[in-house]
Image (cartoon, rainbow, N blue to C red):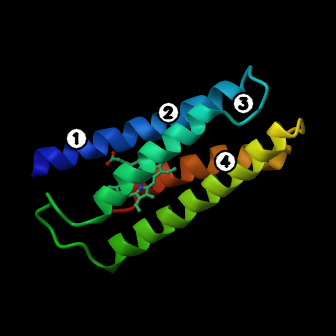
Amino acid sequence: MQTLREIVVFIHLIGFATLFGAWLAQAFGGKRQFTQLMNIGLAIAGVAGLALAAPWGIDWTPGMSFYIKITVKLVVLIIIGALLGIGMGRQKRGETVPGGMFWTVGILALLNAGLGFFWH
Ligand code: HEM
């Protein structure tokens, strides 16, 4: 069970890497547009994250802090998804993604990774 949880954490990290990597490629040297790869990374991180939100494969009982953390992460994920959706809608209409919207997605992706990594 513990090994399976570690595999799901690994998949969660692949989702993060896909989302943030796709964003970095666009931020530095790219056209600063939202791409389908970001959606895919977000979906992978989201599905694996929801699986990790249940307390299985761990030998400790999650306290309030754990549930606050995953609630915050879920809210951040929904905001990222909304921004990607709005931005991609604009791109389809031939408009550009506003700079603030583009940078917020990268910062929020990092924030969620930081919450997973540092908040124990
Ligand atoms: C953009 C979305 C997300 C990103 C980039 C992200 C990233 C990360 C990263 C980097 C870790 C650290 C893994 C480690 O080294 O232990 C982590 C852990 C974790 N994440 Fe996420 N995450 C996201 C969304 C979510 C969501 C939506 C949930 C749940 C609703 C979630 C639940 C968790 C849990 C339970 C852990 C393990 C933390 C622990 O065991 O204390 N994540 N996440």
Q: Position of residue 69 (x, y in %)?
A: 42, 68
Q: CA distance from mark 2 to mark 3?
A: 14 Å
**Secondary element type, mark 1:** helix
Q: Is residue 37 visible?
A: yes
Q: Position of residue 108 (x, y in %)?
A: 61, 52
Q: CA distance from mark 3 to mark 1?
A: 30 Å
Residue 27 badge: 3
Q: Is residue 33 left or right of residue 39?
A: right
The answer to whether 69 is drawn above or below residue 100 in the figure is below
Q: Residue tagged by mark 2?
A: 18
Q: Position of residue 24 (x, y in %)?
A: 63, 30
Q: CA distance from mark 2 to mark 4?
A: 13 Å
Residue 66 or residue 15, whichever sits in front? 15
Labels 3 and 4: the sequence-earlier one? 3
Q: Position of residue 14 (x, y in %)?
A: 40, 35
Q: Is residue 30 left or right of residue 107?
A: right
Q: Quadrant of the C terminus?
A: bottom left
Residue 103 or residue 51, whichever sits in front? 51
Q: Residue tagged by mark 1?
A: 7
Labels 1 and 2: the sequence-earlier one? 1
- Is ligand 1 within 8 Å of the beta carbon of the residue shown at mark 1? no
Residue 105 badge: 4
Q: Residue at x 24, y 72 (%)?
A: 62
**Secondary element type, mark 4:** helix
Q: CA distance from mark 1 to mark 4?
A: 26 Å
**Amino acid at pointer 3:** Ala
Labels 2 and 3: the sequence-earlier one? 2
Q: Nearer the viewer, mark 2 or mark 3?
A: 2
Q: Is residue 25 left or right of residue 118?
A: right
